[in-house]
Amino acid sequence: MDISIWCVFVAFLLIYLTRLPVVIASRRQEGYLEIGNPREQQARLTGVGSRAQAAHQNTLEAFAPFAAAVWVAHYGNTDPGLMNTLAVVFVALRVLYVAAYLADLNPWRTVIWMAGMFCVIGLFLSPLL
């Protein structure tokens, strides 16, 4: 299987891995994990818990454009080296983005996010090269 396809799978896993800090923060801040209505509990999170929830949401939002861009690049006969490089860099940047979000590293978080989006744009446009 192509490296870029594996990157889509890893990006999918990141959606769920970024939930872990949210769950931990929920338990620490309130002493329990609300299973019946977790979104209400998550809305009350503060500090790192609130940032963890935002990082998770952003990871979820970034997945679809990335997956679509890999598909376009793959079926647009993009050079595999370019396609794989952009996909790997995107996934690495997403990991850094979550870490920067949790650590409240502004404006680095935004710079990392923009670099990741440039990878997605590059994947979308790569068949034109």
Image (tube, helix red, strand yellow):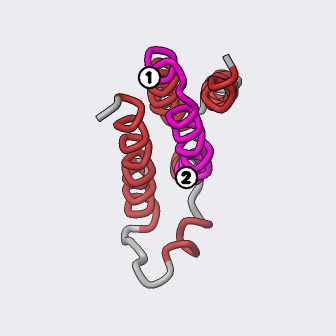
Q: Is residue 14 visible?
A: yes
Q: Amino acid at mark 1?
A: Asn
What's the residue at 38%, 71% (across, down)? Answer: 33
Query: Which quadrant is the C terminus positioned in?
Result: top right
Residue range in magenta is 54-83
Q: Nearer the viewer, residue 76 or 19?
A: 76
- Number of other residues with Cα within 10 Å of mark 1, as a class: few under 14, some 14 to 19, many 20 or more: many
**Which SS class for mark 2?**
helix
Give the left or right position of residue 36, taking residue 45 as reference: left
Residue 102 coordinates in the image, percent (x, y): 52, 38
Q: Which residue in the protein does label 1 denote?
A: 84
Query: Would you say residue 124 sits in the magenta stretch?
Result: no
Name which quarter of the figure residue 116 lies in: top right
Up/down of 22 relative to 115, above or below = below
Q: Earlier in the sequence, mark 2 or mark 1?
A: 2
Mark in the foreground, 2 or 1: 1
Residue 32 coordinates in the image, percent (x, y): 37, 71
Q: Amino acid at mark 2?
A: Leu
What's the residue at 64%, 22% (across, down)? Answer: 115
Up/down of 1 relative to 16, above or below = above
Give the label on residue 107, or none: none
What's the residue at 42%, 76% (across, down)? Answer: 34
Spatial CA distance of label 2 from label 1 is 21 Å
Name which quarter of the figure residue 84 lies in: top left
Residue 63 coordinates in the image, percent (x, y): 54, 47
Numbered marks: total: 2
Q: Which residue in the protein does label 2 denote?
A: 60
Q: Nearer the viewer, residue 107 or 59?
A: 59
